[in-house]
Image (tube, helix red, strand yellow):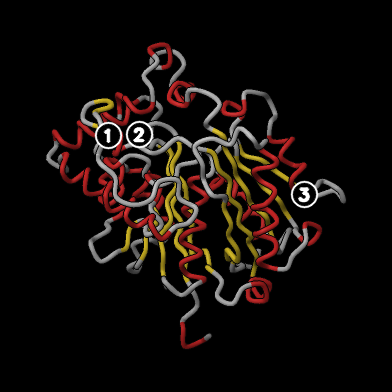
Amino acid sequence: MIPRDVAIVAFAQTVHRRRTDDLSEVEMLMPVLHEVLGETGLKAGDIGFTCSGSSDYLAGRAFSFTMALDGVGAWPPIAESHVEMDGAWALYEAWVKLLTGEADTALVYAYGKSSPGPLRDVLTRQLDPYYLAPLWPDSVSLAALQAQALIDAGDTDEPRLAAIAARSRASAEDNPHAQLRGPRPRGDLLVHPLRTGDCPPIGDGAAAVVLAAGDRARELCDRPAWLRGIDHRIEPHGLGVRDLTDSPSTRLAAQRAGAFDRPVDTAELHAPFTSQEVVLRKALRLDDRVRVNPSGGALAANPVMAAGLIRLGEAAAAIHRGASDRALAHATSGPCLQQNLVAVLEGEPRAAR
């Protein structure tokens, strides 16, 4: 197989909202798909491969992703796939498809409506079904265990967690798509030591990107965001056998993606809780010279099943507009950073443009 360069050439997302009772998943998704295709001038029939990420648990019905295909248009017939994961993993599948040469362009989209049900309880279904799930430890309680472990280890404290929340939401002031923007109080204690300000907002949203290979990417975008490396790894399913203050899977994924080969200037981290940014910064060896979550990150908007894809999209968009030359994007899924994906994106040298 001849190696191919693959790039993100377009990115679009919804304005993320607490509730979208007036919209179905298809109605929420269609404007995003029209926007991302419009950025490239492509039509649905021009796309070689389509891949989506979503969760039937959020939708409350089996095979819910098939209904979302109404927003894409399945006629003429399309080459299509789906992952029951965050859309970042759908992007990974599309990247592999383009590397094989089976397609030159790909449309990747993801969506999630968390508002209809109790999200903290729904996410409990990700846990080990024999030992953990029957105890119903919700997602915030598990994140609080991780935060307390970090405090006990001396890796952080509550004022530093508050500073992460303040910085993230201040950064989101310039992001018109963010659900929470601007300075906010740290809030009431939710599950010790986490306060409401340490936790992500619950909301609905969708996102989409277009990938293209080689010269096709240069035709569709003035400054493509080239995917120089991407990898994903997973921690053990049992929380009791993990060190919650560290993320070996993130470190390994970053190493295999080439994140440590040269410095990055921007990092979009999928850290739904302030304490998780502490873990990721350490695993990814990020210092204060790196701009972390200039979009506001998941603390500003966290549409489940789309938030990881948004991190890749935001990193790519920073390269498109010249705000970054080499960016790192991270996505996670599962409790306490269980599954982690890391991608490295680069713009072409400015002298060559």
Which residue bears the numbered disc 2? 336
Is residue 191 among what the camera can see? yes
**Cα–Cα gap, marks 3 and 2:** 34 Å
Above or below — where is 145 with respect to 349? Answer: above
Which residue bears the numbered disc 3? 79
Q: Tell me whether circle 2 and circle 1 mark residues in contact (CB < 8 Å).
A: yes
Above or below — where is 350 with respect to 267? Answer: below
**Residue drawn at (45%, 50%) of the image:** 178
Work out whether mark 3 precedes mark 2 in sequence or the reverse, and give the earlier one.
Answer: 3
- Horizontally, residue 213 falls left or right of residue 332, namely right
Three-letter amino acid code at disc 3? Ala
Which secondary structure, mark 3? loop
**Residue drawn at (74%, 45%) of the image:** 71
Three-letter amino acid code at disc 1? Leu
Which residue bears the numbered disc 1? 244
Residue 2 at x, y percent in the picture: 64, 67
Residue 343 at x, y percent in the picture: 46, 57
**Cα–Cα gap, marks 2 and 1:** 7 Å
In front of the other: 207 or 287:
207
**Cα–Cα gap, marks 1 and 3:** 40 Å
In front of the other: 206 or 110:
206
Q: Quadrant of the N terminus?
A: bottom right
Work out whether mark 1 precedes mark 3 in sequence or the reverse, and give the earlier one.
Answer: 3
Three-letter amino acid code at disc 2? Cys
Which secondary structure, mark 2? loop
Q: Residues within 10 Å of mark 2 (few under 14, many from 20)?
A: many
Residue 224 at x, y percent in the picture: 56, 71
